[in-house]
Image (cartoon, helix red, strand yellow):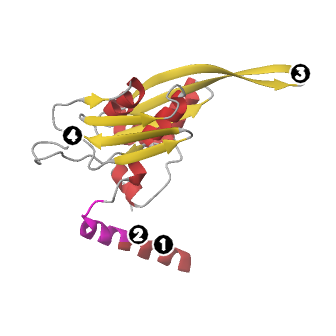
Amino acid sequence: MKIKSLEEIYLFSLPINESEITDFFLGDSLKDEVLKIMVVQKQTRAGQHTRFKAFVAIGEYNGHCSKEVATAIRGAIILAKLSIVPMRRGYWGNKIHKPHTIPCKVTGRCGSMLVRLIPAPRGTGIVSAPVPKKLLMMAGIDDCYTSARGCIASLGNFAKATRLYSPSLPIRNSRTTLRPKLQLWLQHRVFIQGK
């Protein structure tokens, strides 16, 4: 079975082990942005060991977004490509044109940070601090209210709490279209394991 889109990878819960897979499916539409670079130090017997930590956000501004922390910008970009996830979008009010906001109220948490995302009417824009605003824009969400509690000075936790809302969204109601593909995949797995 040949995979033809990134959504099929998420449908079968397959891990993305190489960043080139993301490049192949999303190509030139993928944009990356460095949120922050900071110096971290560790005290050892030989003295202080200095490293750099980079916060990088990646998205295509049309439904896929990622955020990852690593010790260098290049490594952070590769890790962000490996952790890219689809973002579910919805409507507020009438179902006219494309989905423009999140489908329901959701909350993400990381450390002391608590970020609540609330759907907004069309034309509102993203009412948020700069960090969640960049992540939501990269996910292709045009209208959204946000509420943040905790220490918003820790940019890493703020970005993670914003991103963590996507797995908590309810699954779409179109289960009938997904069932045959999943059944085929399960039959294939049983057949291979039986050999």
Q: In the rendering, which numbered label is found on residue 189?
A: 1
Q: Residue 80 at x, y = what percent?
A: 49, 36
Question: Mark 3 highlights which residue?
Answer: 46
69 relative position to 95: left or right: right
Of the residues under marks 1 and 4, which one precedes in the sequence? 4
Q: Residue 103 at x, y = what percent?
A: 26, 49
- Distance between mark 4 and mark 3 Cα atoms: 54 Å
Question: Mark 4 highlights which residue?
Answer: 100
**Contact (Cβ within 8 Å) of mark 1 with mark 4:** no
Give the label, 1 or 4, closer to the camera.
Answer: 4
Of the residues under marks 2 and 3, which one precedes in the sequence? 3
Question: Mark 2 highlights which residue?
Answer: 185
**Contact (Cβ within 8 Å) of mark 2 with mark 4:** no
Q: Residue 189 at x, y = what percent?
A: 48, 72
Q: Residue 38 at x, y = what percent?
A: 60, 20
- Predominant secondary structure, magenta span: helix
- Distance between mark 1 and mark 2 Cα atoms: 6 Å
Looking at the picture, tell me which residue is in the foreground, 156 or 65: 156
